[in-house]
Image (cartoon, rainbow, N blue to C red):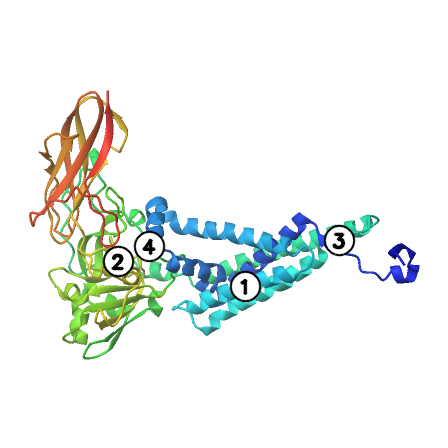
Amino acid sequence: MSASELPQSESAVQPQRTRLRFFAAAFTGVLALAAALAVGHLVAGFISINASPYLAVGNGAIDLTPVELKDFAIRTFGVYDKLVLLGGMAVVMVLAAALAGVLSRRSPVPGTVIIAVFGLIGAFAVYQRPDLTAVALLAPVASLGTGIVTFLLLHRLAPRVWREANTDENTGTSRRAFLIGGAGVVAGAGAAGLGGQLISSTRDATASREAIGKLVPARTAPAIPVDADFAKLGTPSFLTPNDKFYRVDTALTVPQVRAEDWSLRLHGMVDREIRYSYDDIRNRPLLERTITMTCVSNEVGGDYVSTSNFIGIDLADILDEAGVKPGSEQLFCTSVDGWTSGTPVAAAQDRDRGAMLAIGMNGEPLPLEHGFPVRLVTPGLYGYVSATKWIVDIEVTTWAARQAYWLKRSWAQEAPIKTQSRIDSHRGFANVQKGKVRVAGVAWAQHTGIGKVEVRVDQGAWQVADLSTEVNVDTWRMWWAEVDLPAGVHQVFCRATDKSGYTQTDQRAGTVPDGATGWHNVTFTAA
């Protein structure tokens, strides 16, 4: 007997095979993702913003990114590298969520499984964070539950394609319910996400920083000579304003540590373990040092070099108080967000070098993004081994016992800053008037000092540039020269010689594993 020959009562109970409309299915997955992330962010607001599954996965992605790709991101996107990462993650997650919805057109099972996998990834990322406790897992758990419930609800309401043709009324009803439900999810997700952001902002360290006020060192740095830069010729100003100081770190969100909550534990291979509060540091006689810092990710001609008047105390003082034991090799330093670096003990104890626990820059408390309330500053070494921001722990140990973040990723163990120079004016591909042209730039060889800078046009002879007044051997030095450019296209090169007699090599090398090398050059068109 055919289906058409079945009695009406028996035919009525036959199941109708349906599937979600394509765009409704995709939208269902995307809305479930938005609700999940928003609720996770809301719950994280009460615990720690880093417990947000989205941010935790982003931080995990940073940790797992190959060194070459990470270096490319810093080189290409600069301070926007983290924004690009989060944006890329968002695009991938939206596409995956839409795919989960499409795969669930007939049954919600595939989408539910995919959501569960996403949730477990988020939970694992939170669990792996060294700065979070077990309670932080509440955020990804809430995110997972919300995602599944929202997906199942919207899947039930979503408009379908039915086998029968006479279902226009049912389809219209389903579409209206789905639109109302979707609008509710959008509104709820927006409120939850905003709520999480607002709640987390209540622990913002801005008020704590502002309450500190201006820092007045007992021993100030020597005044900067008026001819320490050639800013009128196109070089940077000698001191870098705080808001212009380069920033390279692995933190997706700036850690919020109030001065009144901060403490530093000094332990390991020492005679006595000591814990310092912020007041313990600030109430000591503060000193000020003018120091140029450089990031190892700075390519030839790059901008990741800046100078500031840092205010703080001698790192050697607290190491002496703890009593560093013989055989120790590194200070294994940990940031509040779990990032680690290894600073050579010899450099930290060298009073001539002047390593500092810094609490201020250019007369102000450290900016939040530059390590407030306390950071490490060790002149002459690239930042990844010398300049831990938001520092909360120093373990005196050996190289064999502990491996810091970048050492695990095959960067060099000890990283003295290489002698380098850069042309700032004119910029590459500039059109200039033929004849005498002034070029200007900067050079640095921290803790050694710049002795000479030379320039040449094309393959011509090197000529010595005029140098600015030296402030100290731990800072950059400006230079300028007048070159003769006939009509046509020309390349202008620069190179520096430091006070040890070393002249920077022309051999180009990338930043990995211990800093870039090569002569910087720019191309001019003279007419």
Are the residues flagged by discs 4 and 2 in contact, CB closer than 8 Å?
yes
Q: Earlier in the sequence, mark 2 or mark 3?
A: 3
Q: Toward which corner of the image does residue 416 lie, by quadrant?
A: bottom left
Count of picture labels:
4
What amino acid is at disc 1?
Answer: Val
- Checking the image for residue 67, the label placed there is 4
Question: Tag 3 or tag 4, which sits nearer the N-term?
Answer: 4
Q: Is residue 231 above or below residue 43?
A: above
Question: Is residue 169 in view from this perspective?
Answer: yes
Q: CA distance from mark 4 to mark 3?
A: 50 Å
Q: Which callout, 4 or 3, points to the residue nearer the camera?
A: 4
Q: Of marks 4 and 2, which one's residue comes earlier in the chain? A: 4
Q: Mark 1 sits on what residue?
A: 117
Helix, strand or loop at label 4? It is: helix
Which residue position holds label 3?
A: 174
Task: Give the CA separation, mark 2 to mark 3.
Answer: 58 Å
- Give yes or no for contact between labels 3 and 1 (Cβ–Cβ under 8 Å): no
Q: In the image, what residue type sits under mark 4?
A: Val
- Considering every residue shown, the one lying at the far bottom of the view is 271
Residue density around tag 2, few if under 14, some if 14–19, many if 20 or more, within 10 Å: many
Q: Which mark is residue 417?
A: none
